[in-house]
Image (tube, rainbow, N blue to C red):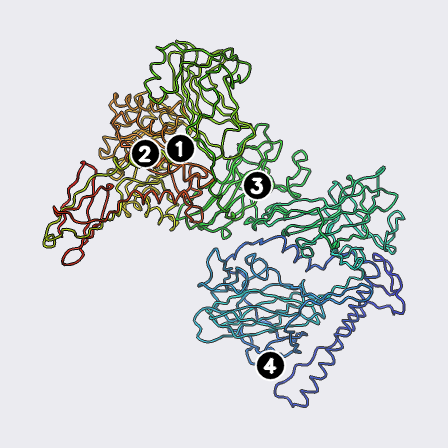
Amino acid sequence: MLVPNSKGMTKDKGELMPVAAREPVHVADVAFQLSLPRRTALRPDGPREHQLAVANRDRLRGTARRVLATTFLLLYTSVCRDIGDSRGPPRWEQRRREAKAAGDGDGEARGSSTLPAKEEHERKEVVASSYGDGGHGARTDQKKGRDTTDNRQQQQPQIVMPATSTPTKQVVDKRGASTEVVMENIVLNSDFSEGLHLWQPNSCHAFVAVEGSGYHYGVRPHSGSSYAVLTHRTQSWQGLEQDITENVTLGTEYFITAYVRVHGEVHEPVGVKATLKFEEESSSTNYISIARILASQECWEKMEGSFNLTTIPRHLVFYLEGPPPGVDLLIDSVTISYKKTERSVSSTIGGTENIISNYDFSKGLHPWNPISCHAYVASQWSGFLDGIRGNTGENYAVVSKRTEHWQGLEQDITNRVSTGTAYVVSAFVRVDGNVQGQVEVKGTLRLQNTDGSTHYNPVGSVLASKEKWNKLEGSFSLTNVPKHVVFYLEGPPAGVDLIIDSVNITCSGHKQSKEVKVTSGVETVIKNPHFEEGLKNWSGRGCNICRHEYTAYGNVRPLNGSYFASATGRVHNWNGIQQEITGRVQRKVLYEISSAVRIFGSANDTEVRVTLWVQEYGRERYVGLAKNQASDKQWTHLKGRFLLHAPFTKAVIFIEGPPAGIDILVDGLVLSSARKLQAAPCPKIENVLYGANLLHNSAFTRGLAGWSPMGSCRLSIQTEAPHMLSSILKDRASQKHISGRYILATNRTEVWMGPSQVITDKLRLHVTYRVSAWVRAGTGGHGRHHVNVCLAVDNQWVNGGQVEADGDQWYEIKGAFKLEKQPSKVTAYVQGPPPGVDLRVMDLQIYPVDRKARFEYLKEKTDKVRKRDVVLKFQGSNAVNLLGSSVRIQQTENSFPFGSCIARHNIENEDFAEFFVKNFNWAVFENELKWYHTEAEQGRLNYKDSDELLEFCEKHKIQVRGHCLFWEVEDAVQPWVRSLQGHHLMAAIQNRLQSLLSRYKGRFRHHDVNNEMLHGSFYEDRLGRDIRAYMFREAHKLDPSAVLFVNDYNVEDGCDTKSTPEKFVEQVVDLQERGAPVGGIGVQGHISHPVGEIICDSLDKLAILGLPIWITELDVTAGNEHLRADDLEVFLREAFAHPAVEGIILWGFWEMFMFREHAHLVDADGTINEAGRRYLALKQEWLTRVNGNVNHQGEFNFRGYHGSYTMEVDTPSGKVVRSFVVDEHSPVQVITLNI
């Protein structure tokens, strides 16, 4: 502080410039003059004349105090203006800004307060003005023994009535000076949007009610989305308080408003009060009531009051209190505001308002802020820098001690800009220091979005020098306003001082072409997401964490903002950085996360993950949110989404993954509720010639016309010997295409070399194309090689089908593909065998599939396979004279099994459970029955989840498949099992079988015994080939009622040479020969762009075993829900129409709980999308509805799907309703109904 001395002069504790016509004043003198005697306490029983005289004396003394205080403040303000005070905003204003930018700090309410109760204090007079009931209440709290006598005269200070309305006013004088009156709120976190941050419950319990956690007894906020609740109150004075000491000043009138209501055992309105607690230097405490209102349970009441301080105590605490003990106090929107007058002498530039505050630094640096460097104001009084005079006025800013080019001077202009307005930027700048020639100075906008991201946009630049002032000019226009808009000047190299004068941002009056586009977003759930407040709200998960700028880790620069954090001293892969988000996320809401990460301490890339830990329904669960490979060379982005079904008591998000000893670097973590995207429309598909081959000269009648080699191989046309075509010509569909000519590729030096043809212009988006070809590889006796038809779609590789082939015979390739984005170039080619192996290709076809024509065929096939003839015969008293009577048949349920996989946490979502129970009659558990779930650690069995899921299914009469006893793929085997060998592994297998099958004997209809044996060999490699059959044999002994299945993927679509239908058949035959009681074939059905004929062909090949086929894990994926619905319909119709298929299980239906993205039938918010509607429509199509009349034989005949029915018949005595079931065992079913 600058202190005037006896000479009226000082300069940094030195001397001031003399002030004309002003007597020197000492601060001590002023303090002495303000230290007037306290007013004498008034006695309520004294003579009225005496009371009036004393009251008049007190008013005079109060007026004198205010006059003296005002005089001192004006003197001090004038002195500060003369010296160019650059101290910036007062402490309370800076604190308010920091708190506003910081976020919660403490999060939600922390429970009961540990503050002591108010202690008994001597009542002393408080020099303050109040509004309310005139200090209505001197009171006694029995706990503290204070006097509660209504001593109104003794407690009544001067009363000031509040203004009913205080709108912003602005007056502009002839010189362009403007005076603006605004209301400034000094209460921090006034709407409790940051929980109870800066508030304290007074010897009671408090929490913040928000929409996500549920409002207090259903009471909604008066405004906003949150309010405070004070509970467990045992005294009337218990309430909620906030220290406002640093936020108030002398001589300022403050206006109080708060919305309050009560809840509890109250039958009439009760008093709620606003009180100030004064803690003096002498340790005495005084209380004064400043507002009061009667509050009820029915509605929010607005409490109003005001006060004016003439002394500032050591601590000043504002609090709300009043209702009787046991009554809850609810508080919303608390404000203590004052009229703030701002005068800007030259804020108008050419008749246009300048939105920069203190543009000429005449008020010091307020409200400018240096960015990670030093700044001060040079003026005529303080001495100009190196003799440099201001360009336009008497002051300019100097930015020094700059260690980075981006360091400079900034000002927040968020509340002064608007969208669609063009702004012109100008500033006079120059540089000083060790610099030669000119250097660039830039004007930049820093846009901080509500989703936590930060964008930087240049708005002007100039080449500046040491010799003269240079004018920087630019412009910008915002398309939308982000959370914060900060303008700053930057640019010169490190070590060079930046000098700034006269900064202006004005409205141009016309639209500028330069627009600053701001990425809008949703408020992030993460507090302090970019570490701008240090490590506040963050903690290490089993390790240390640090915050860095630019100097750590070999000068790693943050990707966004100014800081990044690191997790160091990691000794486990789960160590990392974490933040608890309990209370800030809700169940049944979709969230999305994004983060930028890198590693330090390893030159090799390693996986980094974002994981969510939740505690729900009495157990812990880890949810993987995002993962990616990270390096020590650049930042890597992690993005993901999640949704929580079950209620939870705690949630923590953390970043983990790399091996021990490797540091994780994190540049921000943003978590926000995902925006609902509008579904893409159904694409229009036109001008498609279905069944026509896209390839030119596919029969090679014109030699190599249209064909070219892929790479440097050589192509030629050859003719096959007739005896080699015998296997092909057995297929009638091939006979019309096969000519015997084929293309031969020789001199192949790479696997990708072969015949090719460009087909870009012939393809249509969103159309499913079928691929077929006959191929041979090499010559006889050299084994089989992979051969596949590929499509090079720009820079991507698309599989069009593959097969293992040798030179002994021709092999057929079947496949399909679909394009959903317009490519620039598409090349179809055949490749695969190793270099040096010749490749032969015959009858390569690519043609669009006519699904509608196939559907008509399938409907006829379905009618034959899934329906049977039914004859209804009637007997009983009403069966006489029924000829011609009306009969109405309605099928209530198709008995064909339609199911879905479910997980334990899914069923906690009521909407999920309802959809599942209503639309499925079979279930399979996603993970809860797998060995790695039931025995993650050896000997520690966990059947709790599977028990509860099974009970849920049995309660709703839903049949269940067991998935799975073992899993042959090594990656799916838990570590402790992988560590076992020989008889130890065998013993573990036996224990697993005994434990699970004896526990659930008779309760699971199916069991997948050893999952995906076509793709893995973990147990076979360690225990020999017979181990697989052993598993089947032992499982059958322990639970003879369960049907035992093989189960595998990619069997149905021709895209995987490991799992062709032929190989699946070979596997089953081998198991049966070893005594394995294989009872069913599981075809998983994870498919994209299905082609009905290919699926049917695969099912036909599997059906030769005579075993029931189940589609066990069906999902189809497409980003457009209409295309997904089409693909799903293809598979469902094909499977339902096939006589060998006895059940279809979907691998999920709810968004975020699918094995693959874009495969869901129900969106995360519970909306049934087009794929879901298509599924439900097919289920309705496969229900029989028949109306007719009883025939001459007294019967009613119809053909219907298998399942449950109701029948309504009109009889002479009225309508009769009966139920019956149509089974599938004989061609004709005769049902006799007693009516």
Q: Which residue is mark 1?
A: 850
Nearer to the camera, 740 or 261: 740
Q: Do residues under tags 2 and 3 come within 8 Å of each other at their CB atoms?
A: no
Instruction: Name the element at disc 1.
Output: loop
Residue at the image position 57 percent from the left and 64 percent from the top: 333
Q: Which residue is mark 2?
A: 857
Nearer to the camera, 976 or 50: 976
Query: Of marks 1 and 4, which one's residue comes earlier in the chain?
Result: 4
Query: Of marks 1 and 3, which one's residue comes earlier in the chain?
Result: 3
Residue at the image position 51 percent from the left and 38 percent from the top: 626
Label 1 crowding class (10 Å Cα cut-off): few <14, some 14-19, many 20+?
some
Q: Which residue is mark 4?
A: 152
> Image height check: is 742 above or below 847?
above
Label 3 crowding class (10 Å Cα cut-off): few <14, some 14-19, many 20+?
many
Q: In the image, what residue type sits under mark 2? A: Tyr
Q: Is residue 887 left or right of residue 1026?
A: left
Position of residue 975 measured from the top left corner of the image (x, y, whole percent): 42, 30
Hey, which quadrant is residue 223 in on the image?
Answer: bottom right
Disc 1 from disc 4: Cα separation: 93 Å
Q: Foreground mark, 3 or 4? A: 3
